[in-house]
Amino acid sequence: MTTARPDRLPLGATLGPDGTTFVVSSGVAEAIDLCLCDEDGVERDRVPLEPATVEGMVEWSTTVAGAAAGQRYGFRVRGPGDPANGHACDPAKLLVDPAARRLVGELQWAPELTTPGVDSAPFVPRSVVAAAPEPLAPVPRRRSWAETVVYEAHVGHLTARHPLVRREHRGGYLGLASPAVLDHLQRLGITALELLPVQHFVSEADLVARGERNVWGYNPLAWGAPHAGYA
């Protein structure tokens, strides 16, 4: 049974003064465990989440005292195993937090990912507790659309071989934000920069089987986590 709660907690992992609150939403789960892992990704503890109904949605949550930034974690869900109807609950599967702000580790396309009752933990990334970003002040649009020039860019490709960008920053966020790149865009008259996907994404199984990889990023694994390959 769920209890009613008047307020809605932020989904994901939220740092507090004494620990971290973990929240995930599911209307079909019968039980959800938070799996706390060490820095090597090894599961060390499980904490049951408590359900509550908020505005018609079922949220599962718990607060772990002492859990700090950098804590690795995942979820295990018990409930209906009915993929034909969109339900694939299996406590043997370690799940990424869909609202995670950071992931570590690589997804490996192993049969264990989909074989019922077989632990998937060795083959999946871990979610990581991270502080919420500082809120940005809204910037008023100073130009009309007629005066706007949008430049679409790929974070990895834009600076991969840029001679004026530090080698260790090429192909990543720091390279994109380097003075050489920003000055170049300004000289071109660019007024807005539009980036191809920057969420944490993975390569599809068929690409991996052919020794290839997803370059463009249109296969996200966690919408709120920046792609680690660009960091």
Image (tube, helix red, strand yellow):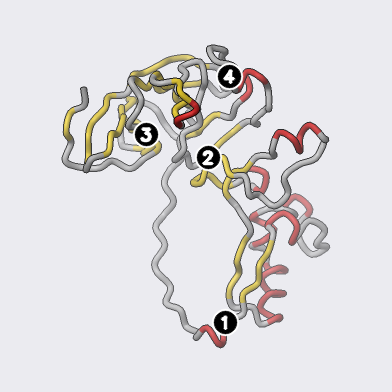
Q: Quick one: label 3 or label 2, which is nearer the N terminus? A: 3
Rendered image quadrant of residue 58: top left
Vertical position of residue 6 compared to residue 133: above or below = above
Graded by Cα atoms within 10 Å as few (under 14), some (14 to 19) or many (20 or more), the crowding at tag 2 reads many
Residue type highlighted by circle 3: Val
The dot on residue 148 is 1
User: Residue at point 36% right, 38% down?
Assistant: 15
**Residue type at the position of mark 1:** Thr
**Looking at the rendering, in which quadrant would you find the N terminus?**
top left
Q: Are marks 3 and 2 in contact (CB under 8 Å)?
A: no
Marks 4 and 1, the one that precedes in the sequence: 4
Q: Nearer the viewer, mark 2 or mark 1?
A: 1
- Counting residues from the start of the chain, the first of labels 3 and 4 encountered is 3
Q: Residue at x 53, y 41 (%)?
A: 222
Q: CA distance from mark 2 to mark 1?
A: 33 Å
- 102 is higher (above) or lower (below) than 77: below
Decide if residue 35 is in sight here.
Answer: no
Please provide percent x and percent y for residue 184: 72, 74
Q: Give SS at disc 3.
A: strand
Mark 2 highlights which residue? 102
Q: Is 103 on the left-hand or right-hand side of 12?
A: right
Q: Secondary structure at mark 1?
A: loop
Give the distance between the C-alpha atoms of the residues marked 4 and 1, in whole angstroms: 48 Å
Q: What secondary structure is marked by label 2?
A: loop
Residue under label 3 = 24
Q: Which residue is mark 4?
A: 120
Q: Is residue 37 visible?
A: yes
Q: Which percent across, then down, holds residue 203?
A: 69, 39
Mark 3–mark 4 Cα distance, whole angstroms, equals 20 Å
> How far separated are the C-alphas under marks 3 and 2?
16 Å
Q: Nearer the viewer, mark 4 or mark 1?
A: 4
In the image, 105 versus 70, the foreground residue is: 105
